[in-house]
Image (cartoon, rainbow, N blue to C red):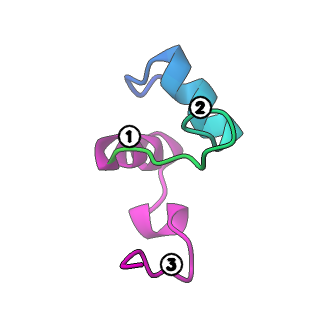
Amino acid sequence: MADVGLSRFTHWKLERRESNPYTPANPRLCNILAVAQALDVELADLLPKHIPDLRR
């Protein structure tokens, strides 16, 4: 991936879709924006099509 200012550890966590072992990734918005810009895609392209209900 192009250099987007993410630490190697953050990049590693995003690739593995984990925040902590066995915990789904929960990246910061600025990290998602950095990845979208590096890939030259829209932010919406990186988000799930069906947003889960997080109010539970």
Direction from residue 18 to residue 42 in the image, left or right: left
x 46%, y 48%: residue: 26
Q: Which residue is mark 1?
A: 31
Looking at the image, do the residues carrying marks 3 and 2 touch, with CB atoms under 8 Å apart?
no
Q: Using the numbered discs, state the Cα–Cα distance from disc 3 to disc 1 in whole angstroms.
A: 20 Å
Q: Residue furthest top?
A: 8
Q: Which residue is mark 2?
A: 13
The tag earlier along the polypeptide, 3 or 2, is 2
**What's the magenta region?**
29-56
x 47%, y 22%: residue: 3
Amino acid, disc 3? Pro
Residue 49 lies in what quarter of the image? bottom right
Q: Is residue 4 magenta?
A: no
Q: Which residue is mark 3?
A: 52
Residue 35 at least partly seen: yes
Q: x, y percentage for residue 16?
A: 70, 37
x 29%, y 43%: residue: 30
Looking at the image, do the residues carrying marks 3 and 1 touch, with CB atoms under 8 Å apart?
no
Secondary element at tag 3: loop
Q: Nearer the viewer, mark 3 or mark 1?
A: 3
Q: Nearer the viewer, mark 2 or mark 1?
A: 2
Q: x, y percentage for residue 38?
A: 46, 39
Q: x, y percentage for residue 20?
A: 58, 33
